[in-house]
């Protein structure tokens, strides 16, 4: 077998806008050298993590993945993903670690993950969300801004599940909603009750009324370290990952003391059962650097930095 996001409450609105778009950045020190070439984007890999340093690991690695398109559909409301969503984290697979066997007989390692060194495992920008039944003439009041945030650790990372029905990973998220009336702590989903995505590049098997849809593994490439180290990089360019079996939980923290949770739940039809929602991550580029030695991987990435 083969391995393989017109009110009088101006202050509230201003606070919401600042929360979404941030305040002007203060002066920063000169940037450190960053990995380039096949390791580009891996500067926040948690290479100093004790978990990655465990001598029982047979494989360790770094992942950078950027999605530049797609959509999120909750019931009858669809939001286009017009801003990049970036994932970056470390991975490890111990000797005799978990594997998965696919229907065609191939076997792939199931990696565990370690958060990004800077704590920004998932980064995204706010997206404008229409409010069903309401004409959007004043963004942020007659619509909301939503930002995708991580709601727990990424699990069950199977990078070689290309074209297979198995999810590439389990990704728990929550949607942070910003609106002049909702306040600053309004979410769909939470850390304790997240939206758990299981996107695949293969074909889904959703409950009705959704029907199966198929992703795309994109262009797959394998590159050896250019400086003679033992690391190699697997890249997946232009992939599409899909999940239409996802369940979307209720809103929380919207309005004073959650007094507007029911509004969000009503207009978006929450909770939304599996089979009525769809997530598509398109134009996704992912690189995975893997090595049998953490020390060797560190040197390989350092040697590429400029």
Image: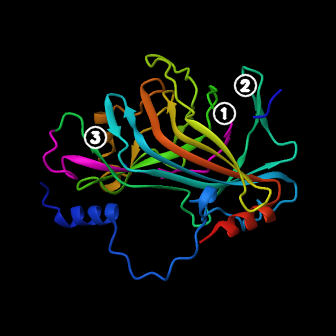
* CA distance separating discs 2 and 3: 43 Å
Q: Which residue is mark 1?
A: 161
Between the C-alphas of marks 2 and 1, the distance is: 8 Å
Q: Position of residue 246 (x, y in %)?
A: 50, 31
Within 10 Å of disc 2 (Cα), the crowding (few <14, some 14-19, many 20+) is some
Q: Which residues are magenta?
A: 135-161
Q: Quadrant of residue 228?
A: bottom right
Labels 1 and 3: the sequence-earlier one: 1
Is residue 169 among the parts visible in the rendering? no
Residue under label 3, please give it. Answer: 263
Mark before the other along the chain sequence, 2 or 1: 2
At horizontal 42% and vertical 50% (from top left) the residue drawn is 84
Question: Circle 3 sits in a helix, a strand or a loop, which is it?
Answer: helix
> Does 34 sit left or right of 160 as displayed?
left
From the top left corner, tell me how far across and down residue 164 is, in percent.
64, 27
Q: Secondary structure at mark 1?
A: loop
């Amino acid at each position: 077998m083969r391995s393989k996001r017109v009110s009088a409450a101006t202050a509230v609105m201003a606070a919401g806008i600042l929360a979404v778009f941030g305040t002007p950045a203060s002066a920063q020190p000169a940037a450190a050298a960053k990995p380039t070439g096949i390791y580009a984007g891996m500067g926040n890999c948690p290479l100093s993590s004790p978990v990655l340093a465990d001598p029982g690991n047979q494989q360790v690695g770094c992942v950078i993945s950027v999605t530049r398109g797609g959509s999120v559909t909750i019931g009858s409301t669809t939001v286009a993903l017009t801003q990049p969503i970036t994932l970056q984290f470390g991975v490890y697979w111990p000797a005799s670690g978990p594997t998965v066997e696919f229907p065609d007989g191939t076997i792939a390692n199931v990696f565990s993950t370690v958060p990004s060194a800077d704590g920004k495992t998932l980064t995204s920008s706010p997206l404008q969300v229409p409010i069903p039944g309401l004409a959007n003439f004043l963004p942020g009041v007659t619509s909301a801004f939503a930002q995708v945030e991580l709601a727990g650790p990424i699990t069950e990372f199977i990078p070689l599940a290309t074209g297979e029905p198995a999810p590439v990973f389990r990704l728990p998220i929550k949607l942070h909603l910003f609106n002049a009336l909702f306040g600053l702590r309004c979410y769909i989903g939470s850390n304790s009750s997240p939206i758990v995505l299981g996107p695949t590049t293969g074909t889904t098997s959703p409950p009705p009324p959704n029907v199966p849809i198929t992703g795309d593994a994109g262009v797959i490439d394998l590159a050896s370290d250019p400086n003679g180290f033992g690391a190699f990089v697997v890249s997946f360019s232009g992939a599409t990952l899909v999940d239409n079996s996802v369940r979307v939980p209720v809103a929380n923290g919207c309005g004073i003391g959650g007094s507007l949770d029911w509004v969000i739940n009503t207009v978006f039809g929450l909770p939304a059962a599996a089979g009525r929602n769809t997530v598509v991550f398109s134009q996704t580029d992912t690189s995975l650097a893997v090595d049998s030695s953490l020390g060797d991987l560190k040197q390989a990435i350092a040697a590429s930095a400029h």
